[in-house]
Image (cartoon, rainbow, N blue to C red):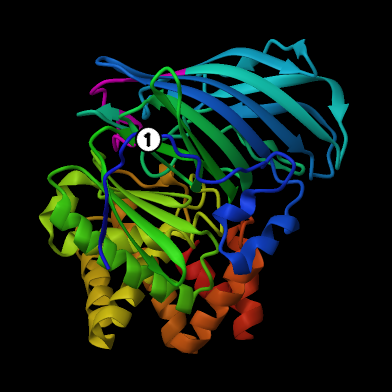
Amino acid sequence: MRYVVFLIVLLMVIMPVAAQDGTGYEAAMLPDYAADLDAFPHAPRYSMTINLDLGADQATFSGFQSVTYTNESSDTLNEIVFRLYPNYESYGGVLTVNRVQIAGSPITPTYDATNSVMHVALAEPLAPNASITIDLAYTTIVVNDRVRLYGQFSYSNGVLATPNFFPQLSVYETGAGWWEYAVQPQGDAVYSETSFFDVQVTTASDVIVITSGSRVADTLNADGSRTVRYLAPLMRDFSLMASSAFETISDTQDGIQIDVHYLPSGTRGADAVLAYAKVAVQTFNELFGPYPFAELDIVETYTNAGGIEYPGLIVVQDDAWNSLDTFLEVVVAHEVAHQWWYSLVGNDQTAYPWMDEALAQYATALYYGKAYGPTADDAVFDSYQGNWQRYLNDFSDLPIGGPVTDYPDNAYYYIVYQKGPLFFKTLADTYGEAALLSALNDYFMAYRYEVATPADMQASFEASLGADLDVLFTEWVG
């Protein structure tokens, strides 16, 4: 059934919530998976209050956040590190931290040369299993029509698309320290851990705000502004899209509400996107394991990439959206697959992009097999093979397991996205597709909400398949 939602400004409180004490987050989970919340009592917790202004020249976030971090490593920490991704050249924004406090005492942070890594020194070291709460005030500016790299962080034609707009915790690895990689030549920029987000956004009454997680309260204020509250539990990132032009259609699949948000010219594309997303969710739930969240949002934006994945939310390029051709279906299937491979099972996307990208490409082929029959997925695998072979006509082969910086020019696409899924196809051909799917399900359940490494994947596959995979991993991954 097709539902068109015209977001009219009205006084509405959807439901009372109280998330900071650990309750209320159930509203953003499917009932069968609400118990997952209790399994991560020490995951980072963000409480944010944001004023958002969409001006003619720029969009401005004026934000305050309180972040509680628990040291789950075996090391004693002398500092906490935050990432300020809008300051990347590839983002083209400006994130300024105006104030940092711990227990009411001001702290002066230090920054790396890129201004994207912020170090907060601790007056007293943080022992293993101990927690600390850090309060930050910040301003983020997104300049109108300043488009960098994929346009993933942008404000164009009245549409705001902002992943990682806030100071975000880095990842601490025992023995290795805080993750401080600070370049995005291509691919994805973010490496983060599963967290809890409680976010309140106040903006103009006609602005439609779409975020990761679920909307749990919506209030029209006395001054005519509008305050919307979102809860996003067990997500490793939080993204926000906004525009006064969005319209929405919704439907459900396997109990999950799928909301498709589109611009005025995108009505036909929205119908197609919703249909593809339903098949993708059904397919990946069946093949890999359950999507546990109550909602999945798909948003038409002015990205330069075909689509980009975020936890609980994906964006699709407006040109692809309105093309209504095969590419649109490929983009939707691929990006929905990332809800399993990146969002739920995390990895360092800068060091090991193949772990989520190649696996999402493999999942896309499986989607076609489920949607159109086994000859359809064979055709997709044949296209991967053909594209990789055409690349080899002019360039030397590379393993799929390198960081993004290992792939010059168009090698990233051909090696990670075209050769990469053929590694999983080789495993399926060698051990049987049913056995590989069972191994993927085991891997998904073992690392859901966690971060996995290539060694973790290999060990999980070996246990599931009962085989030594050293030769195959060395040949393909490197």
> Which quadrant holds the N terminus?
bottom left
| Residue labelled with disc 1 | 10
In the image, 116 versus 287, the foreground residue is 287
Mark 1 is surrounded, within 10 Å at the Cα level, by few (under 14), some (14 to 19) or many (20 or more) other residues, namely few
Question: Taking the image as drawn, is residue 325 in sight?
Answer: yes
Callout 1: SS: loop
**259 versus 204 height, above or below:** below
Q: Amino acid at mark 1?
A: Leu
**459 versus 301 height, above or below:** below
Q: Quadrant of residue 122?
A: top right
User: How far across and how far down the image is residue 389, in percent?
Assistant: 23, 67
Q: Is residue 263 left or right of residue 25?
A: left
User: How far across and how far down the image is residue 428, in percent?
Assistant: 44, 83
Q: Quadrant of residue 376?
A: bottom left
In the image, what residue occupies the spot 56% across and 59% down?
Answer: 345
**153 versus 298 height, above or below:** above
Q: Is residue 474 left or right of residue 66?
A: left
In the image, 408 versus 200, the foreground residue is 200
Q: Is residue 271 left or right of residue 141?
A: left
In the image, what residue occupies the spot 70% across and 63% down?
Answer: 35
Q: Is residue 169 magenta?
A: no
Question: Taking the image as drawn, is residue 416 in sight?
Answer: no
Look at the magenta stretch and give its main secondary structure. loop
**312 versus 360 height, above or below:** above
User: How far across and how far down the image is residue 178, in percent?
Assistant: 67, 35
In the image, what residue occupies the spot 25% across and 60% down?
Answer: 273
Magenta highlight range = 140-154
The mark total stands at 1
In the image, what residue occupies the spot 50% across and 52% down?
Answer: 352
User: How far across and how far down the image is residue 239, in percent?
Assistant: 45, 39
